[in-house]
Image (spheres, helix red, strand yellow):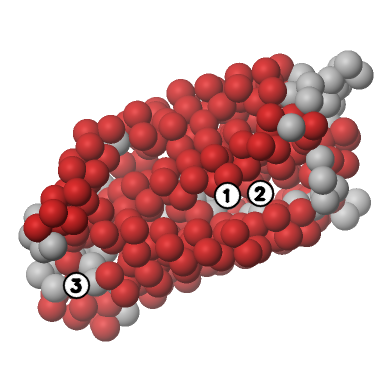
Amino acid sequence: MSIAVPLASAISYLQAIILGILQGVTELFPISSLGHTVLFPTLFGWERLVTAQSEPESFWLAFVVMLHVGSAIGLVIYFWNDYVEIVKGLFRTLSTRRVETPPERLAWLIICASIPAGILGLIFEHKLRTVTAKPGLAAIFLTLNGLVLFAAEQYRKRAEVRELAQREGAKADGGRELDTLEFREAAVIGVAQSAALVAGISRDGVTMGAGLARGLDHQDSARFAFLLAAPIILAAGIYKLPDLLGPKGAGIRGQAIVAAIAAAVTAVFTVHFLLRFFKTRTLMPFAVYCLVFGSFMIIYTHT
């Protein structure tokens, strides 16, 4: 399948919309949005985008940042009331110097998880995204992502994880309450989140896996992953905004905005679906998908 790129622009509006919708789904599904935005141009025959992906300096990174900002905006829209309570809780703790309520604790859990992810992102983001943004490597890491999801599902069944959940006050479904996480546990989850700098590794997938390993159930693991994603993605977007406004963004700014809008709208529907899905389901369907699609793309990119 080949969809031509107009010579007048690096990326067409049709491609921008397709990639925006893809971003809004794959950023929240634990299947790696970055991996899919690398692999789909290869699958569709968008050669100019494929070439730009692995160049050290190109419009591609600026465009990808806007894709992520779009999905983060969708998360903020969906969780607006939660974020309002979290921000209020944060300011209360700064005033009272105590953490007493679930929103207050959640605010500091998000901060503790965001600090290591932010530091590692600043150090390694550009290098890892350019080095791994190659279809063959992205396919390999997507397959590895499937194995990570499978391993997370197996690990959460271990006796020590069940004992941890019981010790921290398990809910009816056996998982511990989200606000019982220790701050050091949130920091470890933040480090795990940094693996998403590699194309093919899912931010939400590794974050959920780390949450499951600490005794959370699937729904709370997903909720924490989603709440954690928006601040770090928006911060990265602000940091990378000069790239879009500078020479690298020439000719793609309109397309980037359209893609971000498509990603935001799609993300709202996606997160609603997933929070309902993880009430009763596990990561296994996504593990199978990553293994199958990743293996297919390994063969496809090497033939």
- The residue that disc 1 covers is 32
- The residue that disc 3 covers is 165
The x and y percentages for residue 173 are 16, 59
Instruction: From this view, report whether residue 120 is shown above or below residue 138.
Output: below
Q: Is residue 149 visible?
A: no
Q: Which of marks 2 and 3 is nearer the N terminus?
A: 2
Mark 2: few/some/many CA within 10 Å (<14, 14-19, 20+): many
Kind of residue sitting beneath label 2: Gly
**Residue at image coords 66%, 49%:** 35
C-alpha distance separating marks 3 and 1? 28 Å
Residue sitting nearer the eye, 107 or 181:
107
C-alpha distance separating marks 2 and 1? 5 Å
Element assignment for label 2: helix
- The residue that disc 2 covers is 35
Instruction: From this view, report whether residue 183 is shown above or below residue 95.
Output: below
The picture quadrant where one finds residue 273 is top left
C-alpha distance separating marks 2 and 3? 33 Å
Kind of residue sitting beneath label 1: Ser
Element assignment for label 1: loop
The x and y percentages for residue 266 are 47, 27
